[in-house]
Image (tube, coloured by chain):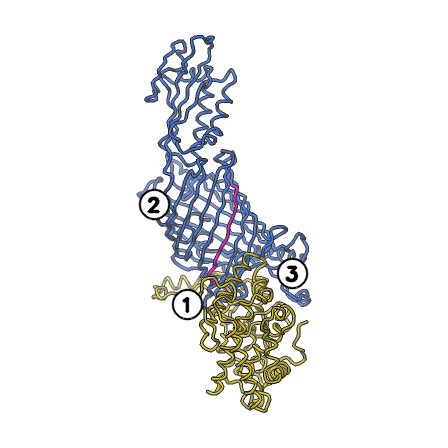
């Protein structure tokens, strides 16, 4: 955002001169830096603070932002520099509400007229005037979107600042290559006038085709989500969601695994996500790192529902620029790598940790493989397959290394790169050891020891033999909306049933391994 | 090769240049054994027997007891009459290739091959093929399980598929007296969530009302208003039950004429017997006329079956049970 700090004609240096009508027309940076530095150290306080142009915004919201500024700068000894810093931080905070236009911010300072009777002080009393322009309160949009391995068309309506407290209602309908239809409505509001702490409620309904497992999944649900920003550029979100999943529309060739999992289930879960993105460019990272973790607890204890498990997924990726000796400027060459790990641990329902436990269903298990994670494999190409269906696994690990080179005759600033990559992954399903203990079992449920043994052996299986592996070379084009990749790859190591892809593969997405 | 499935789109079948093909043939450099299937699949789908997917409860399915859905019970009975060795698995319509249960999945030939499902209409052909292949289990050659019934039987069959079916749908789905039974059989097993159960219950009732309306010709049930089908609104319940009573009486006298105890003078129970049994058994088991249904002075379909032809149909039910489920008294309780 661009919060311009404009200085009024009467500045702190000539405090003896009480100019009654300061000019607020244009910021004047006429003084030298040294002069400015001196000015910043002079004592100052805020006499008045006005916000103009926020006609539809509640006073209380603005108070949350600006009251602390006035209060913090009240003590004697506050310098002009501190006042300016405070005001700058506050306007940035105001901008994060996303209800004001970025280019509309203006901050103007002037010295407050001092009453004749007032005792002389060496402090400058400032009148601060902040000008904002509100964004349109109702916005309709339509367009096309790229998610991971999917393109879609959407229409969207957003009502901003509904009650004057930066509340947002967004209603969205879309249809895509895989998502037959999706509707959702989200109401979101900052808490306590803090733009970095938001509460949102969402209702959603969607039908998504899952051709890698010969079915369609219909979701109907709602979630309540609290998201907050931490100082070190991390974002956290804690969400409770309840979703009715209906696995239906099976293909004629659907496998027995998919058929037995067809039907209804309700997932009631708590999810925590954490993201710290320190990459210079998310679509074409040349420097920096990304950390992300997703932890989910479903069905256990008071959550109820039809499925019960703990599931966690972590991702770390990073890139380093490579400087070429003898080349002073940026080379545009970089190396990068990424690692993703995931584990699903089935839990008994109710409050106990040791009881009858249902093994995972296909819509809760992980899928791995495809142009945006383990390249050189089809979508869901890794892991257990029943016939042609990717049925998913409970434990996975995937990693990739890549090197990016600018194409000849395009500079390091071009969004095009030549890519060399190798990536590998392993996706394993929990299965109880065959034989004795299975015979004694009446139903499907496993006891906690069997679950533990199963998970343990699945984790052990990750390192059994080489991981499934593919390598190749390709072109990367980093568009601001999505990243496009065209790769030529060959699978080096596979398991039987896993679907590698020899030759060309196109990848479109926003989050690549 | 796993990476080149036969169902590849046609553009991928275009000729790959020879040197490239030779390169492709070198990869993958190493292929390990297949990943084992997840636990649910291992436990539910790796039986050596063919599996009949039906509406049932876990414990009933394990014991192979009759399904509580007439459509499923008919075919389950026929397969038992045909002496096919199979197991049952509780399932939902979502799983079926035709959109409704039952269907049969043959056993896997290897741990991860996926057999194609056999819809209900092809079950008898499959059973014939299986039983004639295995000599140890040869059925009697004169066992008449021909699904193509003679024209006379076809006419009587409509008494079952229209009149009895409408009455069953009306009683189970639309009669509030059977709400708890409907929930116990169909909505509670689907999900533990009350909201999901309520939605499914509404959908089921609506679908049943539509079915009665479609098959209304013989049953006399007409849906006057489709909008809020929350009960028997808009459906002439009395006509539906009267048609069922007439049908039961007609079937009882038809059975009496036969003299052999089975329909159309057959020596053994056949398709027609199984079709009738699928309704009479369920009506007698779940709507016997004792308890809640009787109190409201409502029609009890079970009592209606018992009364038809001096208990002729009730005895027929006992006989079918005796042949198809020998050693089981016909009551779960």
Secondary structure under the numbered disc 3 in the rendered image? loop
Q: Is residue A49 above or below residue A305?
A: above
- Location of residue A169 with respect to A351 vertically, above or below: above
Q: Which residues are magenta?
A: A212-226
Q: Is residue B43 visible?
A: no
Q: Is residue A78 left or right of residue A417?
A: right
Which image quarter is the N terminus of chain A in?
top left
Badge 1 crowding class, 10 Å Cα cut-off, few under 14, some 14 to 19, many 20 or more, is few
Crowding near the residue tagged with mark 3, few <14, some 14–19, many ≥20 C-alpha atoms within 10 Å: many
**The hue in which chain A appears in the rendered picture of the protein:** blue
Task: Name the side, left or right, on which A251 lies relative to A412.
Answer: right
Residue A505 as seen in the image, left or right of residue B275: left
Circle number at residue B271: none
Residue identified by numbered label 1: B7
Q: CA distance from mark 1 to mark 2?
A: 37 Å
Q: Considering the numbered disc 1 on the image, is that residue within a helix, a strand or a loop?
A: loop
Query: Regarding mark 2 in the picture, which secondary structure is present there?
Result: loop
Q: Residue at x 49, y 30 (%)?
A: A64
In this orientation, which residue lies closer to the viewer: B241 or A25?
A: B241
Give A234 or B149, whichever is nearer the viewer. B149
Measure how far apart labels 3 and 1 are at the Cα level: 37 Å
Q: Numbered disc 2: what chain? A: A
Give me the chain that's yellow. B
Q: Give the percent coordinates (x, y) of residue B87.
A: 60, 74
Q: Position of residue A299 (x, y in %)?
A: 60, 53
Q: As rendered, which of A17 and B48 lies closer to the eye?
A: A17
Q: Which chain is disc 1 placed on?
A: B
Q: Which residue is label 2 attached to?
A: A407
Q: Is B326 a magenta residue?
A: no
Q: Which mark is residue A446?
A: 3
């Amino acid at each position: 955002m661009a919060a311009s700090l404009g200085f009024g004609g009467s500045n702190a240096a000539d405090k003896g001169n009480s100019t009654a009508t300061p000019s607020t027309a244009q910021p004047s940076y006429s003084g030298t830096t040294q002069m400015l530095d001196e000015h910043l150290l002079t004592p100052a306080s805020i006499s008045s603070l006005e916000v103009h142009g926020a006609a539809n915004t509640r006073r209380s919201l603005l108070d949350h932002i600006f009251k602390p500024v006035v209060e913090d700068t009240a003590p004697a000894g506050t310098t002009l520099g501190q006042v300016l810093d405070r005001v700058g931080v506050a306007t940035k905070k105001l901008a994060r509400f996303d209800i004001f236009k970025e280019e509309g911010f203006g901050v103007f300072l002037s010295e407050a007229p001092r009453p004749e009777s007032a005792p002389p002080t060496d402090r400058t009393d400032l009148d601060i005037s902040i000008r904002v322009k509100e964004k349109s309160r109702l916005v309709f949009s339509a367009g096309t979107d790229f998610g991971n391995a999917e393109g879609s068309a959407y229409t969207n309506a957003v009502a901003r600042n509904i009650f004057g407290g930066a509340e947002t209602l967004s209603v969205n309908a879309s249809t895509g290559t895989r998502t037959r239809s999706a509707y959702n409505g989200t109401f979101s509001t900052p808490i306590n006038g803090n733009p970095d702490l938001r509460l949102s409620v969402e209702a959603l309904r969607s039908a998504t085709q899952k051709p890698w497992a010969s079915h369609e999944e219909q979701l109907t649900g709602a979630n309540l989500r609290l998201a907050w920003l931490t100082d070190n550029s991390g974002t956290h979100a804690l969400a409770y969601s309840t979703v009715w999943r209906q696995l239906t529309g099976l293909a004629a060739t659907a496998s027995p695994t998919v058929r037995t999992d067809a039907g209804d289930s309700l997932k009631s879960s708590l999810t925590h996500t954490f993201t710290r993105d320190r990459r210079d460019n998310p679509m074409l990272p040349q420097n920096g790192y990304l950390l992300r973790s997703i932890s989910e607890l479903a069905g256990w204890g008071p959550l109820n529902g039809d499925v019960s498990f703990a599931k966690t997924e972590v991702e770390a990726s990073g890139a380093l620029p490579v400087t070429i000796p003898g080349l002073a400027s940026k080379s545009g060459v970089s190396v990068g790598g990424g690692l993703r790990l995931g584990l699903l641990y089935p839990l008994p329902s109710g409050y106990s940790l040791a009881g009858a436990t249902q093994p995972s269903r296909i819509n809760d298990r992980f899928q791995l493989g495809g142009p945006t994670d383990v390249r050189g494999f089809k979508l869901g190409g890794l892991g257990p397959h029943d016939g042609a269906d990717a049925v998913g696994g409970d434990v996975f690990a995937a990693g990739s290394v890549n090197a990016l080179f600018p194409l000849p005759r395009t500079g390091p600033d071009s969004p095009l790169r030549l890519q060399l990559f190798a990536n590998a992954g392993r996706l394993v399903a929990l299965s109880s050891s065959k034989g004795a203990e299975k015979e004694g079992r009446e139903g499907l449920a496993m006891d906690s020891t069997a679950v533990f043994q199963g998970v343990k052996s699945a984790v052990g299986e990750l390192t059994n033999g080489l991981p499934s592996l593919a390598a190749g070379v390709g072109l990367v084009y980093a568009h601001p909306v999505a990243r496009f990749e065209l790769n030529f790859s060959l699978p080096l190591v596979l398991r039987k049933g896993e679907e590698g892809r020899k030759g060309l593969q196109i990848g479109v997405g926003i989050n690549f391994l | 090769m796993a990476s080149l499935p036969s169902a590849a789109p046609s553009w991928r079948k275009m000729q790959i240049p020879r040197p490239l093909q030779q390169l492709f043939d070198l990869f993958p450099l190493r292929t390990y054994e297949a990943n084992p299937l997840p636990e649910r699949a291992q436990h539910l789908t790796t039986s050596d027997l063919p599996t009949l997917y039906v509406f049932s409860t876990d414990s009933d399915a394990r014991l192979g007891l009759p399904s509580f859905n007439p459509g499923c019970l008919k075919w389950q009975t026929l397969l038992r009459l045909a002496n096919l060795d199979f197991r049952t698995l509780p399932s939902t319509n979502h799983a079926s290739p035709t959109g409704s249960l039952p269907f049969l999945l043959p056993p896997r030939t290897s741990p991860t091959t996926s057999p194609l499902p056999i819809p209900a209409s092809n079950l008898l052909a499959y059973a014939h093929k299986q039983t004639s292949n295995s000599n140890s289990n040869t059925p009697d050659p004169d066992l008449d399980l021909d699904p193509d019934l003679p024209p006379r039987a076809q006419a009587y069959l409509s008494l079952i598929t229209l009149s009895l079916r409408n009455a069953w749908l009306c009683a189970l789905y639309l009669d509030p007296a059977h709400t708890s039974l409907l929930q116990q059989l169909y909505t509670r097993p689907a999900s533990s969530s009350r909201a999901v159960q309520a939605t499914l219950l509404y959908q089921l009732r609506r679908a049943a009302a539509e079915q009665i309306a479609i098959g209304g010709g013989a049953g006399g049930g007409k849906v006057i208003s489709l909008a809020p089908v929350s009960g028997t609104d808009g459906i002439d319940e009395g006509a539906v039950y009267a048609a069922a009573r007439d049908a039961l009486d007609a079937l009882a006298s038809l059975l009496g004429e036969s003299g052999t105890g089975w329909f159309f003078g057959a020596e053994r129970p056949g398709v027609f017997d199984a079709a009738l049994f699928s309704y009479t058994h369920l009506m007698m088991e779940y709507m016997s006329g004792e308890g809640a249904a009787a109190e409201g002075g409502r029609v009890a379909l079970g009592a209606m079956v018992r009364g038809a032809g001096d208990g002729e149909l009730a005895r027929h039910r006992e006989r079918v049970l005796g042949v198809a489920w020998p050693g089981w008294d016909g009551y779960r309780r």
